[in-house]
Amino acid sequence: MASSPRVVAASSPSSMSAESGTLALSPFRHPGEAFAAVQLGLHVACRAARDPEELSLHHEIRRRVFVEEQGLFDGSDRDDHDGDPTTVRILGLCGDVAGGAVRCYPLTDTAIGGGAVDVVDTGAGLWKGDRLAVLPSFRRNGLGAPLVRFAVRTAAEAGGRRMMAHIQPSNVGFFEHLGWYTVGGPVSYVGRPHQTMAIDLALLLRRL
């Protein structure tokens, strides 16, 4: 088993890291603030969950999207990666209100999960990004791209060489626009068709 990578909080003009010490507000507990943040188009930022409350919020956003809205999972979308200390759980904020989530983590073996088996180049520097979830009311604010970019740069600055992901077919074009490319043909992931995609992290870091 490879040693745990050093995870570096990252920011960029397109997915800025929130520097404020204020904890993220829950859109479920503070619907008024959430509505105002969306309507006013407040500043979008991303950061790793800071404490148990923000971590719980990260998981609740995922549950609302993947369990309640899309029905991809029954009851919970959590798995063993959520208990791994190398997994980075990320929140996307609009103002101080959390509206999206994603996670990323290093891989050390052939990627197996959700019923999909992908033959990829294993070894040091291979990461996976998944569980990209944006609440419906925040999708007009463009939280998806900053969340993806933040996860990608986090992995790159932690020494990642390549990141892979299973992408729903309707989102392939979105990821291609962000610099990802397809790998092989469609696979079955959590019982639904997905496309394996990847991005060269080393190349990305050289461009920064």
Image: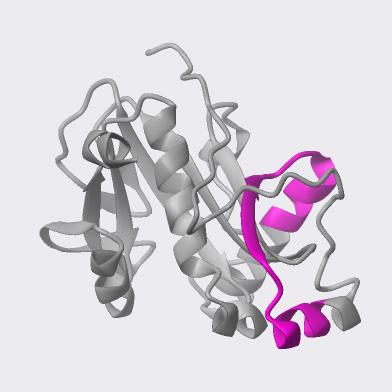
Residue 32 forms part of the magenta stretch: no
> Which residue is drawn at the image coordinates 59% and 73% (left, top)?
65
Residue 81 lies, in percent from the top left, at 52, 38
- What range is drawn magenta here? 34-58
Q: How is the image coloured?
A: one colour
Which residue ends up furthest to the left in the rendered image?
Answer: 184
Q: Is residue 121 left or right of residue 36?
A: left
Residue 47 lies, in percent from the top left, at 64, 47
Q: Is residue 75 left or right of residue 33?
A: left
> Which residue is drawn at the image coordinates 81% and 56% (left, top)?
24
Number of marks present in the image shown = 0
The quadrant in which the N terminus is found is: top left
The quadrant in which the C terminus is found is: top left
Toward the viewer: 88 or 144?
144
Toward the viewer: 42 or 81?
42
> Which residue is drawn at the image coordinates 80% and 62% (left, top)?
96
Residue 166 lies, in percent from the top left, at 31, 58
Snapshot quadrant of residue 136? bottom right
Which residue ends up furthest to the bottom in the rendered image?
Answer: 39
Q: Is residue 91 visible?
A: no
> Which residue is drawn at the image coordinates 47% and 38% (left, top)?
154
